[in-house]
Amino acid sequence: MTVKKQYRKPEIRKIRLACIT
Amino acid sequence: MDKVYSKNPDVVFRKIADECILVPIKNRVGDMECIYTLSEVAARIWELIDGRKSSSEINRDILNEYDVSPENAERDLRELFMQLEDAGSIRETKDGPS
C-alpha cells in the first residue's frame, strides 16, 4: 500500500517586486 | 466543480532551491511588478493542470497522493483555482461533462 504524503493547504503567495526623487 | 483549466502561456513555472515560483513573462523584466510562490501541494496542483484534466480529476489525483479528506481537498482546490485565476496564471477552458 502506498504511503500518502502529508497534506498542507495549497497556498499561493504574491511577492511584490516594485513612487519624483 | 468539474471545470477544465489551462495555464497562461505568459506565465512560467520555475523551481529554485526549495521554492516554486510563477513568473509573468509578458512584459519586460523592468515592468514586472510581482511574482508568486507556490507551496508544495500548490506546485503539485500546478503540474497537474494541463488543459485537459478536469478539476475533479485533479482532485482525485491529490486524494491519491496526499493524506487529506475529500471535503478539504475539494474546498482547497477550489480556493487555489480562484487565486490562480485572479493572478492571471490559469484560465477556464470549458465546462467538463455535465
Image: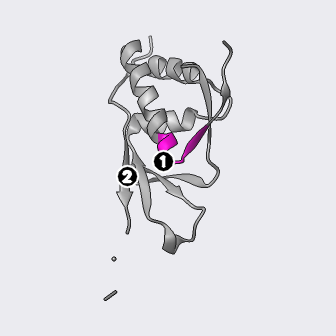
Q: Can you give x and y, in whole percent of width and height, for residue B84 in the image? A: 48, 41
Q: Is residue A13 above or below residue B74?
A: below
Q: Chain of mark 2?
A: A
Residue with the most extreme front position: A20
Q: Nearer the viewer, residue B91 or B22?
A: B91
- Residue interval drawn in magenta: B84-91
* B18 or A2, nearer to the observer: B18
Residue shown at 44% from the left, 15% from the top: A2
Disc sitting over residue B9 in the figure: none
The answer to whether mark 1 and mark 2 are in CB contact below 8 A is: yes
Instruction: Identify the residue at horizontal 42%, vertical 52% (top origin).
Output: B36
Percent x, y of residue B91: 60, 39
Disc 1 is placed on an element classified as loop
Q: Is residue B3 above or below residue B11?
A: above
Image: B75 above or below B87: above
In the rendered picture of this protein, how many numbered marks are placed on residues? 2
Q: Amino acid at mark 2?
A: Lys
Q: Amino acid at mark 1?
A: Ala
| Label 2 sits on residue | A14
Is residue B95 visible in the rendered image? The answer is yes
Q: Residue at 52% across / 71% down in the picture?
A: B29
The x and y percentages for residue B27 are 58, 66
Towards the viewer: B85 or B67: B85
Q: Is residue B66 visible?
A: no
**Vertical comparison of A4 with B32: above or below:** above
The kind of secondary structure element at disc 2 is strand
User: Where is residue A9 shown, x and y percent of the image?
Assistant: 34, 30
Residue A13 highlighted magenta (yes or no): no
What residue did someone put label 1 on? B87
Position of B29 with respect to A6 (left or right) is right
